[in-house]
Structure formats: structure tokens, C-alpha cells
């Protein structure tokens, strides 16, 4: 685990334009100084991320927002009261000070106040907003431990802060706020049901109807993403593995007979979606490292955090 002097060191590196991997309650992020376009460019290079995919800007508290966004409508206030700090990202109209490279040229900026003691301490110590995508190579599995970041990004990062395994385990929910309208751009750690309880109905755009990146309401929600190296098949019914293939199973709760599988990852033996989310990426990573020909994944109940998990599985599935 990182010490206070690690946090001081990381804060200095970030102010000087360095890249630091940081723990958050969702997944690990790859952070850079938001207002330093060269530092942000290094984030895109380290991840192999296309420049059309904008980054989330992290701040420690709401007082820091006034410099970055030009509007903070009443709906955003309600959501912030309920869910910040926490796994909710709000896309809001940006101010000119936010560089185009951060927002991919959009007139909006995505903002999040993370709920992790190390992320909070770092943001306060650094005194600058941190642009941070998930700390994985573009399109691959998101990291939920410091070791995952080291394996995937290694020397591309100047420093890694270790905050232990991430509590939530899937990325933040991304919503776009336009006046009193709330659009769900990416399901995540705050559930649709929780959002609706605060702001009423939510607009869900049909992203996948627009396969070209430019037409996406949220540029990063590409159909193929969050993928392991091993082919992954999302089953609808109980599917038995093809004979002769080394097959692994990813499931919420394991079926009675698993003898046909070489490796089984049961995400929660009580069927608890919160526990399943916390285990999700690490379990996929273990299956990916097990020398399998194929991973069969069973869909989750499409409710609560199950929606975010199904979203990630659909994008991870081999097309
Ligand atoms: O939990 C999380 O959100 C993590 C941690 C590190 O905070 N971050 C994360 O970042 O998942 P990333 O870059 O992997 O995903 C950010 C998503 C992308 O789908 C991106 O397209 C969308 O947010 N996004 C960012 N800015 C946007 C904007 N101005 N308008 C629409 N979508 C935006
Ligand atoms: Mg990501």
C-alpha cells in the first residue's frame, strides 16, 4: 500500500507533467495534469488510445468545478448531492481552459469526484484536476489492482500508487446532463435504478446503432472493448463447451456440473451483483491467463449492477 510520502511524490510528478496510475473505488486510472496538453498526450500514447475518445477529469470536491464547467444545472446538483464522491461521471458544458485533447474537441467535459482515500489525498495534495482514463491498454481489461497496472502498462507509467483492490470493480456510470435531461452514456457503478430514484426518467441512447466512432453520443462506448485476449462467447442458454476445446466458464453462480470446464470463475456464490462486480475483471484476467481456447460467459440478470456487467461482457465478446 502507498504511504503519505508516495502520495507527495506522485503529486509532484503529476504537477511536472508525469503519468501516475491511481487507485479509485471503480478501477485504477492513468492520471495526468488536465491543463497540460503534453502530459495528456502521453496518456493517449501509453494506452494506445485513439484521440477521438475523451478523458474523465477528476477533482476532489465540487468547489473545484467552477473553473472547468460553464453550467451546473439543478439536475446535476441533485445527482452530486446523492452520488459524489462516488462512481458517477457527469458530462457538462466545458470552459475554454480545458484543453481540446482532454475532451476530443467536444464542447463538454466529463467530471468525476472519486471516493477513494488515496485518490482524494492525491487530488488535494496535487492541487490540479487529473485527467484519467482506466489504466489499461485501449480496448483491454480494466485494472482493479496495482499489479494489473504493472503487468499491462509497466514502464509507460512514471509511478503507481497502490490502494489495494478496487471496491466497486466496474467503471463509473457516465451521464450527460443537458438542462433537466439526463442521458445514460455508460452503465457503471451507480445503477440506473439509483439514478431514476433521484432524477426520474433517464434517456438511454442506442449507441450501437451508430457503429462509426464519430456518431457515438459517448465516443468511448465502442462495440469492441474491455476484451481479454482469449475469445469470449456470451451464451444465451446453457451452452456446453465444444469438444476438444479448452474451455473456461465465467458465471454469477456456478451450475451443478462444471466437469466440462478447465477453469470456472464463479463471481458470487450467493448471486450478489455487488460482489460479482468487485470480482469481475480479476476473474476474467485469471481465465485469460489459463491457456484456454475459449471463455464462455453467462449473462447477468439485467438489473442493478448486472446492467454494467452485461455491457462489459457484450463488448468483451468476440464479434
Ligand atoms: O470509473 C471510471 O470512470 C474510471 C476511473 C479511472 O475514474 N475511468 C474510466 O475512464 O473508465 P475511461 O476513459 O476508460 O472511460 C471514460 C468514458 C469513455 O467512454 C468516454 O468516451 C466518456 O467517458 N467520455 C469522456 N468525456 C466525454 C464527453 N465529453 N462526452 C461524452 N462522453 C465522454
Ligand atoms: Mg476504459
Image (spheres, rainbow, N blue to C red):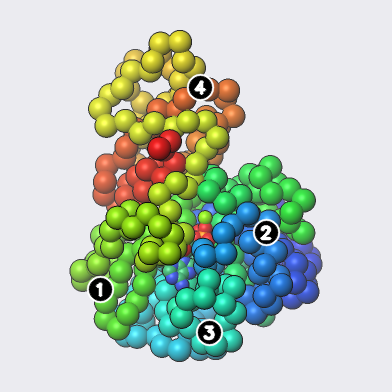
Q: Mark 4 near mark 1, Cβ–Cβ under 8 Å?
A: no
Estimate how packed mark 2 is, as few (under 14), some (14 to 19) or many (20 or more) residues with alpha carbons within 10 Å: some
Looking at marks 1 and 2 on the same chain, the residue that comes earlier in the sequence is marked by 2
Distance from disc 4 to disc 1, alpha carbons, whole Å, reads 45 Å
Distance from disc 3 to disc 4, alpha carbons, whole Å, reads 47 Å
Q: Nearer the viewer, mark 1 or mark 2?
A: 2
Q: Secondary structure at mark 2?
A: helix
Residue placed under numbered mark 2 in the picture: 45
Estimate how packed mark 4 is, as few (under 14), some (14 to 19) or many (20 or more) residues with alpha carbons within 10 Å: some
Q: Nearer the viewer, mark 3 or mark 1?
A: 3
Q: Is mark 1 within 8 Å of ligand 1?
A: no
Q: Mark 3 near mark 4, Cβ–Cβ under 8 Å?
A: no
Residue placed under numbered mark 3 in the picture: 68
Q: Secondary structure at mark 1?
A: helix
Instruction: Identify the residue at image location x=55%, y=35%.
Output: 229
Q: Nearer the viewer, residue 308 or 168?
A: 308
Looking at marks 3 and 1 on the same chain, the residue that comes earlier in the sequence is marked by 3
Looking at marks 4 and 1 on the same chain, the residue that comes earlier in the sequence is marked by 1
Q: How far from the left and from the top, in percent, is residue 119?
A: 61, 66
What label does residue 199 carry, if any?
A: 1
Instruction: Identify the residue at image location x=32%, y=30%.
Output: 235
Instruction: Identify the residue at image location x=26%, y=49%.
Output: 303
Placement of the C terminus among the 4 image quadrants: top left
Estimate how packed mark 3 is, as few (under 14), some (14 to 19) or many (20 or more) residues with alpha carbons within 10 Å: many
Amino acid at each position: 500500500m502507498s504511504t503519505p510520502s508516495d502520495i507527495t511524490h506522485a503529486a509532484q510528478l503529476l504537477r511536472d507533467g508525469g503519468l501516475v496510475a491511481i487507485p479509485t473505488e471503480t478501477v485504477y486510472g492513468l492520471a495526468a495534469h488536465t491543463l497540460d496538453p503534453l502530459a495528456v498526450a502521453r496518456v493517449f500514447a501509453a494506452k494506445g488510445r485513439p484521440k477521438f475518445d475523451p478523458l474523465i477529469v477528476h477533482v476532489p470536491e465540487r468547489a473545484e468545478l467552477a473553473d472547468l464547467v460553464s453550467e451546473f444545472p439543478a439536475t446535476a446538483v441533485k445527482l452530486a448531492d446523492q452520488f459524489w464522491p462516488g462512481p458517477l461521471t457527469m458530462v457538462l458544458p466545458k470552459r475554454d481552459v480545458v484543453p481540446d485533447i482532454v475532451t476530443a474537441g467536444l464542447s463538454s467535459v466529463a467530471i468525476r469526484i472519486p471516493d477513494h482515500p488515496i485518490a482524494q489525498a492525491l487530488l488535494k495534495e496535487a492541487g490540479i484536476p487529473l485527467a484519467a482514463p482506466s489504466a489499461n491498454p485501449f480496448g483491454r481489461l480494466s485494472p482493479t489492482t496495482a499489479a494489473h497496472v504493472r503487468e499491462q502498462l509497466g514502464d509507460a507509467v512514471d509511478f503507481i500508487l497502490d490502494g489495494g483492490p478496487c471496491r466497486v470493480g466496474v467503471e463509473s456510470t457516465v451521464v450527460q446532463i443537458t438542462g433537466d435531461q439526463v442521458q445514460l452514456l455508460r452503465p457503471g457503478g451507480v445503477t440506473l435504478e439509483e439514478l431514476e430514484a433521484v432524477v426520474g426518467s433517464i434517456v438511454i441512447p442506442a449507441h450501437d446503432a451508430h457503429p462509426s466512432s464519430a456518431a457515438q453520443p459517448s465516443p468511448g462506448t465502442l462495440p469492441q472493448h474491455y476484451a481479454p485476449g482469449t475469445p469470449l462467447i456470451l451464451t444465451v442458454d446453457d451452452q456446453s463447451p465444444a469438444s476438444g476445446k479448452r474451455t473456461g466458464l465465467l458465471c454469477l453462480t456456478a451450475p451443478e456440473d462444471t466437469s466440462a470446464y478447465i477453469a470456472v470463475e464463479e463471481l458470487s456464490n450467493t448471486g450478489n451483483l455487488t460482489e460479482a462486480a468487485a470480482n469481475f475483471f480479476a476473474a476474467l484476467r485469471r481465465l485469460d491467463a489459463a491457456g484456454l481456447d475459449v471463455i464462455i460467459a453467462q449473462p447477468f440478470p439485467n438489473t442493478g449492477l448486472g446492467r454494467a456487467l452485461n455491457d462489459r461482457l457484450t463488448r468483451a465478446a468476440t464479434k
